[in-house]
Amino acid sequence: VQQRPAADALLNDLAGHPHAFVLACLMDRQIKAEKAWLIPYEISQQLGGFSMETLRKLSMADVTRLMSQPKPLHRYVDVMGVVFHAAIQRIGNQYTNDAARIWAGNPPSAEVVYRFLEFDGAGQKIASMAANILARDFKIPFSDCSAIDISADVHIRRVFWRLGLCSPDASVEQVVYKAKALYPKFPGLMDLPCWEIGRSWCKARGQECSQCYMKDLCPAAVG
């Protein structure tokens, strides 16, 4: 979310609004990441704040309205509204309104991933992504990073294939385990650079290999 400083401030406020980060992670499905990560900010603008006290007062109908009016905030408003509302309740009930408890106390990375998996709508991809961002970008201390896997979306799978790391028809699980084999200490560390390469240059059509910093090592590089 680079174009909206106020949105960045909310999502980066792990001390005051850690739940904004959690909710943004959960929204990151079936739409562009930039749009998904704006959802907590857009809702905060409608509510005039984003405290857990305010959010816990919202009914399911309130959440649906906020996500659908005056414009839909997600492609699947009804489904993601349920995910959003359930996450608020889980943070309130399980973590006493403080989402930072999910990653507090130098926990094993596997425990953090597991806690994200307990949220409705969070599969391996979202849970690993959330733990990865916490460790990589926010420098949250974990006792290890070995359970933070790569989130093998279409971009990452394509980059792994073109780099000669896996076959073109490799499954998500195969890509995940290839990353584990390459760097077992922190396999998810390869996630962001591969994702950025896939989105920016290593596209399904119209490769821009001359711009890619991996071009000299890539057997599929052209031009």
Image (cartoon, helix red, strand yellow):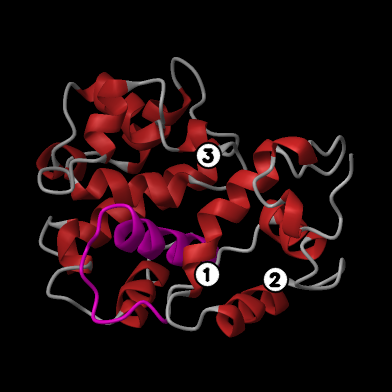
Per the model, the C-alpha gap separating discs 2 and 1 is: 10 Å
Residue type for callout 3: Ala
Whether residue 122 is visible to the viewer of this picture, yes or no, is no
Say which residue label 1 marks. 124
**Circle 3/circle 2 CB separation < 8 Å:** no
User: Dot 2: what SS?
Assistant: helix
Report the magenta residues as a range.
Answer: 122-146
Give x and y (percent) for residue 176: 62, 75
Q: Amino acid at mark 2?
A: Val
Note whether 208 is above or below 25 in the view shown.
above
Which residue in the protein does label 2 denote?
A: 172
Does 176 appear above or below 152?
A: below
In screen coordinates, is 169 left or right of 211? right
On whether residue 145 falls in the magenta region, the answer is yes
Mark 3 lies on a secondary structure that is helix
Sequence-earlier tag: 1 or 3: 3
Which of 21 and 194 lies nearest the eye of the viewer?
194
> How busy is the neighbourhood of tag 1: few (under 14 within 10 Å), some, or many (20 plus)?
some
- Looking at the rendered image, the disc whose residue lies closer to the viewer, 2 or 1, is 2
